[in-house]
Image (spheres, rainbow, N blue to C red):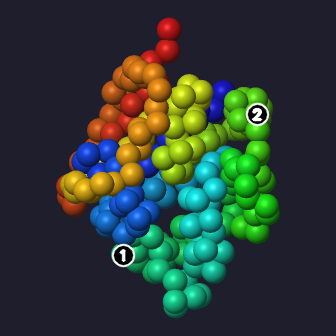
Amino acid sequence: MSKVILSMMTSLDGSIARADGDLNWFLTDAEFEAEMLTVLRNVDAMLFGRVSYQLLAEYWPTAGTNASLEAPGGFTNEEREKTFAELMNSIPKVVYSRTLEQADWAPTRIVRENIAEDLATMKRQATKDIVLFAGASIASTFINLDLIDEYRLMVHPIVLANGISLFRDVREDRTLTLRRTKTFSSGVVLVHYDRKRD
């Protein structure tokens, strides 16, 4: 059965965005981009909350063709951005939202309730893993429902004053097992933790 992976960029103090939602603080380099491409090439679906989905949907459908839009984090290589765009636009996407009326960034479907049941069905049908690229709210929902099998965090060498904490609404302890770490030349540290289950 496939795994559900929470893949997030965090600051050293565990924030995923500035207080105003700004994401242009994380470091992007060739190593970082190669790691993210590896993630995308090994998943059957991408999961989002509404805010994260809408942010990315503003850019990726026309990536590289709209000069007024800048990719979150920027890119070091035009060809790599094109590869990202092809993957981001072709991988099936699921948005967990009670308020989003429609999702124009295809292929996307909206799930309004029964998150655990929907995800269980997806895991049974998937041949690869499923990745959650999320905001703090939907990430906390998944953590509180104990739906995350692996935490894959890219910790950036920055402290965000009054940032939005990834774990701000988590209600219970979660015991994790370190799987691997990788340090990039930029100072970013990739950490993989598996959810420890009895």
Element type at mark 1? loop
Q: Which residue is mark 1?
A: 76
How packed mark 2 is, by other alpha carbons closer than 10 Å (few <14, some 14-19, many 20 or more), is: few
Q: Image height check: is 1 above or below 153?
A: above
Element type at mark 2? loop
- Circle 2: residue type: Asn
User: Which residue is at 76% across, 68% downward?
Assistant: 104
Image depth: mark 1 or mark 2 in front:
2
- Circle 1: residue type: Thr
**Residue 20 drawn at (x, y percent):** 41, 65
**Residue 13 drawn at (x, y percent):** 26, 46
User: Which residue is at 57% across, 88% downward?
Assistant: 66
CA gap between label 1 and label 2 equals 40 Å
- Choose top left, top right, bottom left or bottom right for residue 144: top right
Callout count = 2
Q: Which residue is mark 2?
A: 114
Label 1 vs 2, first from the N-terminus = 1
**Residue 151 drawn at (x, y percent):** 44, 36
Query: Residue 73 versus residue 127: which sits nearer the camera?
Result: 73
